[in-house]
Image: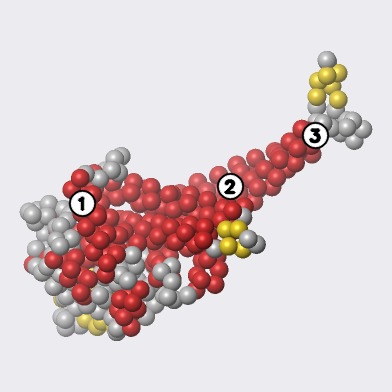
Amino acid sequence: MDFSFTSDQQDLRELAAKILSDATTLERTKQVDAESDGFDRNLWAALADAGIVGISLPESWARGARLPRDVHRARRGRRTAAPIPALAVMGLAAPALAEFGATDALEGVAAGTRIVTAALTEAVGDSYEPSTAATGGKLTGEKVCVPAGLDAQAIVVSAIDGIYLVDPSAPGVTVEREDTMLGAPTARLVLSNTEATKLAGPEGLTWVLERAQTAMTVMMSGAAQTALDLTATYVKEREQFGRAIATFQAVSQRTADTYINKEAIKLTAWQAAWRLDAGVPAAAQVDAAKYWAAQGGQDVLLAAHHLHGGVGVDRDYPFVPLLPAGQAARARPRIRDPHARALGRTHRRLARRLTRLGALFARRASTACRFDFGGAVEADRETTPRPATCASRSSDEEALGASSIATGHRFRSSVIRA
């Protein structure tokens, strides 16, 4: 795997970062949030004018979109908490439309004048086994939490036998606003015997969902990076008892754990994206990335929130807009059942090993220390004074044993939250 960027990709990265950072000031973000749909059309138009929105769309409609470039720009959008439909357009719908040859629906997407999205989530059930019925090219069902669904002119919809393209203005389609904890308003899509164009069968649904999950994990990676940057700056500047709180052991350890989680999210997300782009099987890697985005991402944001103290709930502080990313990572397409069970089995095995290791250290710490002094072995802990090094070692082993046992229990409980 090679995660490095070419010079052209690096230039594109810097251009996207500049446009997004210049346009996502606190004042501008608050102004957009106050509007009804929370969509910064001026910023979206600026990205389209710079060629960023459509740069991944293939010159030949027979070729598929390049996922890593799509998800990287989605990551940039989340790093700045930009109120734009980057996930909906570049991470979900546009790659699917390009892959399955829906050329008419892509007209105007690159120019930023047409919004496309995907409806993949239902109120109940597995995203890989949707309940939306398809009969004679007509769909009946309900989708929730559709990103940018209020502004979309075309929607890719998952159904029981594959994916379809739906015109939200067609008869039998109802689009309702949903206000959730995910930030910008989403849409509830109700289909009642609605005409739809079939794009692909069940294999197409898997194709779309794997890329949707990967796009979400990369966005969570961007949010985690920004949260860690803000936290590191804050704890270095915030002083208590005459020194920066970053020098306190508990704070530094919590920040170190946050860094480890952030790196795990980033590396698993990029591994999934790389494998999808390379055309090699990536189902297990996508699910592992989704797990880390959901579990590790939540841990990163909670730790950042905790370390910021009261500042972490100030709506004028740049950390607060990142919080919906954690909710989105846990709510959007879930890990498919077989791989969820496989991840659970792996974690349970590791938890059992950690627990046994902790018990072993605890037993070693409680037994007598044995020392060989010229052939004489002192084994009576009660009557023979122990050297200081022995006492220190026993204390360390007791602490390590307790830590290992606690870690094992945490691993077990975290499986349920995947």
Disc 3 residue crowd, few under 14, some 14–19, many 20+, Cα 10 Å = few
Comparing 234 with 156, the one in front is: 234
Amino acid marked by disc 2: Ala
- The amino acid beneath tag 1 is Asp
| Residue drawn where x is 60% and y is 42% of the image | 353
Is residue 22 placed above or below 367 in the rendered structure?
below
Within-10-Å neighbours for mark 2: few <14, some 14–19, many 20+ = many
Residue for badge 3: 388
Q: CA distance from mark 1 to mark 3?
A: 60 Å
Q: Position of residue 103 (x, y in %)?
A: 9, 63
Please say if 318 is above or below 378: below
**Left or right position of 110 against 295:** left
Residue at 60%, 58% in the rendered image:
243
Q: Nearer the viewer, residue 398 or 413?
A: 398
Judge depth for marks 2 and 3 and give the one in front: 3
Q: What amino acid does circle 3 point to?
A: Ala
Cα separation between marks 2 and 3: 33 Å
Is the C-beta separation of discs 2 and 1 under 8 Å? no
Quarter of the N terminus within the rendering: top left
The kind of secondary structure element at disc 3 is helix
